[in-house]
Image (spheres, rainbow, N blue to C red):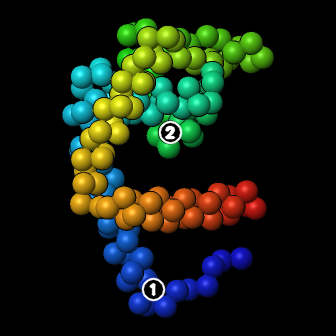
Amino acid sequence: MAPARPRPDTLELAEQLSQLFFRMRKLAYASIAPALEDSGTSVVGLQILTCLVMEGPATQRSIAECTSQHPAGVSRELDALEARGLVVRRRDRTDRRKFSVAITAPGRACMRAGRRAAVVALDHTMRGLSRTDRKQLHGLIQKLLRGHEADSVSS
């Protein structure tokens, strides 16, 4: 069943929020990417390393889902991470057509350094928000994501 058509004023607000989300994503990326240069990784690389720490060894497809990145982009980034010794790819034991990707000790160190740099950069980006504002924003984003996750589970 399709959702009910929203009122015009609701559509206008949704469009404004959509534009703000896109601008905020661009701003966050622009602040984090240069900060990661010293840690030796990219934003996508940091996402992949973080996913592997949180989820453990994973297939390229599950990494793409975990990071919300296109599988081809994940594959290219994994090539770069593997060349630097930050991840290893091994044939999956249960399905020899698949590869399992795992993070290495240097990969964990790179992820920790990258996360520290990203947090500092994002903190600077949000300097105009008070602690209370940040907590409220955090709560609202979590609420949106929980609602979406509930919809995904029921589908």
Query: In the drawing, what numbered circle is on residue 67?
Result: 2
Label 1 CA crowd tier, 10 Å (few <14, some 14–19, many 20+): few
Kindly tell me whether residue 77 is visible in this rendering: no
Q: Helix, strand, or loop for circle 1?
A: helix
80 versus 62 height, above or below: above
Q: Nearer the viewer, residue 22 or 74?
A: 22
Residue 129: percent from left, percent from top: 29, 61
The amino acid type found where label 2 is placed reads Thr
Query: Which residue lies at the image location 42% right of the left edge and 17% below the top edge?
Result: 109
Residue 150: percent from left, percent from top: 69, 61
Residue 32: percent from left, percent from top: 28, 39
Query: Which residue lies at the image location 65% right of the left edge and 77% below the top edge?
Result: 2
- Does label 1 or label 2 sit earlier along the sequence? 1
Q: Quadrant of residue 153?
A: bottom right
Residue 52: percent from left, percent from top: 56, 26
Q: Quadrant of residue 8?
A: bottom left
Query: In the drawing, what numbered circle is on residue 10?
Result: 1
Q: Nearer the viewer, residue 126 or 80?
A: 126
In the picture, which quadrant includes the C terminus?
A: bottom right
70 versus 84 height, above or below: below
Number of marks drawn = 2
Q: Residue furthest front?
A: 131
Query: In the drawing, what numbered circle is on residue 42?
Result: none
Query: Which residue lies at the image location 49% right of the left edge and 10% below the top edge?
Result: 105
Spatial CA span between label 1 and label 2:
30 Å
Query: Which residue lies at the image location 71% right of the left edge and 76% below the top edge?
Result: 1
Q: Is residue 151 left or right of residue 20?
A: right
Kindly tell me whether residue 150 is visible in this rendering: yes
